[in-house]
Image: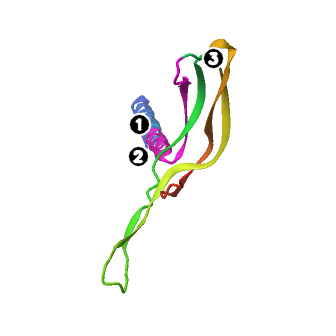
Amino acid sequence: MIQTGPLARSGCVAWTLYLCVALVLLLCGVRMADSKRREQRCMKHYFVHTIEHPSGNCEQKHILLARCKGFCNKSKTEPRVTFSPVLYRPFNYHCKCCRDSLSIMKAVRLTCEGNKTVFATYRYILRCKCRNCNFRRW
């Protein structure tokens, strides 16, 4: 038997409202989880840095810099097999770090006392990537 009165319609409206609320909560939960994953992955983040000359006799400048920040989740330690009686390095370490994959050199001009000019140089990060952690020596 099918009910067709106001009571049946209010039950239908309540059920529809319940489904809409459940759908909104589900979508918000997925978006929050996705944004949390996005915050944690390796990516470029901007920040403002103030450049000051060590002498203190120059103007200060604020510049926009970028840093690499986030997780890579790719590290492992494996035992090294050797025929030597002494194990100097008993393990092979493999790790990934969130670091620069592309950068350019930039310079900022500061005016000092007596109208002298000095340049501060730095690397500006264009792209970040999960890469091996063995940092190169400059």
34 and 47: which is toward the camera: 47
Measuring from the top left, give residue 131's x and y in whole percent. 53, 57
**Mark 1 sits on what residue?**
18
Alpha carbons under labels 2 and 1: distance apart: 24 Å
Q: Callout 3, which amino acid?
A: Cys
Q: How is the image coloured?
A: rainbow
Q: Mark 3 against mark 1, which lies toward the viewer?
A: 3
Q: Residue furthest front?
A: 114
The region drawn magenta spans 27-56
- Secondary structure under the numbered disc 1 in the rendered image: helix
Tell me where residue 113 sits by quadrant.
top right
- Mark with earlier residue (2, 3): 2
Q: Name which residue type carries label 2.
A: Met
- For marks 3 and 1 on the same chain, the one whose residue lies earlier in the sequence: 1
Q: SS for tag 2?
A: loop
The residue labelled by disc 2 is 1
Which of 75/110 is in front? 110
Residue beneath label 3, please? 112
Residue 64 is drawn in which quadrant? top right
10 Å neighbourhood of mark 1: few (<14), some, or many (≥20)?
few
- Front-most of residues 14 and 89: 89
Query: Could you classify mark 2 by the number of other residues whose Cα lies within 10 Å: few (under 14), some (14-19), or many (20 or more)?
Result: few
Q: Residue 20 location in percent, x, y?
A: 47, 37
Q: Percent position (x, y) of residue 121?
A: 63, 34
Q: Is residue 55 magenta?
A: yes
Q: Is residue 47 left or right of residue 92?
A: right
Q: Amino acid at mark 1?
A: Tyr
Residue 88 vertical position relative to residue 3 in the rendered view, above or below: below
What residue is shown at x 53% (from left), y 49% (from top)?
Answer: 99
